[in-house]
Image: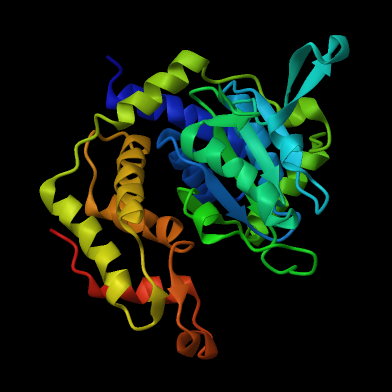
Amino acid sequence: MITPEQIAESLARVRAVVSERVVGQEAVIDEALVAFLARGHALLEGVPGTAKTMLVRVLAGALNMRFGRIQFTPDLMPADITGINVLRDGGRSAEFRAGPVFTDLLLADEINRAPAKTQAALLEAMGERQVTIDGEGRSLGELFTVFATQNPVEYEGTYPLPEAQLDRFLLKIRVTYPSREAELGMLDNYSRGFDAERPADVRPAPVLDESACRELRGAVDTVKVAPEVREYIANIVRATREDPSLTLGGSPRASVALFRTARAAALLAGRDFATPDDVKQFALPVLRHRVMVAPEAEVEGRSSDDVLDALLTRVVAPK
């Protein structure tokens, strides 16, 4: 059986390969790895040019996963995602033509640019890892993972994701501008010949294979979460329902998401047990898209992260 130390070493190699190309986004890379380990999907939110697409491409290469990309647009149809049955022989038979959803790591680029009906085509795939076409269910791979992106500052021609769709994302990852030093490091890469537009540069040699990916995901289920840490998770989520600055708190699914994420975070750190710090570190990515800020708090200029930060200072963590 693979040990926590071996797991940490494997994940450190993946992290190094991704960090070499996606410079200055170490926290984002860790959050993306945690989403993958916890068998979850992630919503990446950041302005254009912050390497969201490149991150997903590089991660797929390092994990040796099949990569698919869908550019969401207002005229994108559900069948463009799932695929269609094409009639042949004068209608006597049908041939299924698979859509881009049949892959391992799917990048749903600018997901909020497609109408709700098209966004909903991903809902079954994300929740059940299968799609239904003409009444027939078609299974997706066990490793199937969605990383979606959206731009937080451009609203014209966009369709906000419905609550049911948002809740399917294990994490909402904020991708911000890199530091000055990291941006200089990125330019150093380009001066040495790196080019993000060149496929070979953003598809590194695989660090892990499919069986290793499955084993790592399976190892998450063996991470121990002590009763006091489980209680801490429940207290945080319940506090979101009682906070007057929020009109919508986290559901029981949010508690499960925080539990799964804490386990994956512990594994990423090379431990076989979760700590309160694992929970606190990932509380914002797990909860920020599952709560709704009250109008009064919005008028004061407070965001969901502001409210959650304040809440975390009030909920006592176990020693």
Image point (60%, 19%), residue name: 206
Q: Position of residue 48 (x, y in %)?
A: 75, 57
User: Does 234 sit above or below residue 264?
Assistant: below
In the image, residue 28 lies at what x, y percent?
54, 49
Q: Residue at x 56, y 36 (%)?
A: 125
* Vertical comparison of 285 with 85: above or below: below
Quarter of the picture containing the C terminus is: bottom left
Where is residue 249, by image quadrant? bottom left
In this view of the protein, which residue sits in the foreground, 187 or 50? 50
**Residue at screen point 16% across, 56% down:** 231
Residue 199 appears in view = yes
Q: How many marks?
A: 0
> In which quarter of the view is residue 106 placed?
top right
Seen at 46% across and 64% down, the residue is 288
Image location of residue 95, percent across then percent down: 76, 15
The residue closer to the viewer here, 86 or 50, is 86
- Residue 2 lies in what quarter of the image? top left
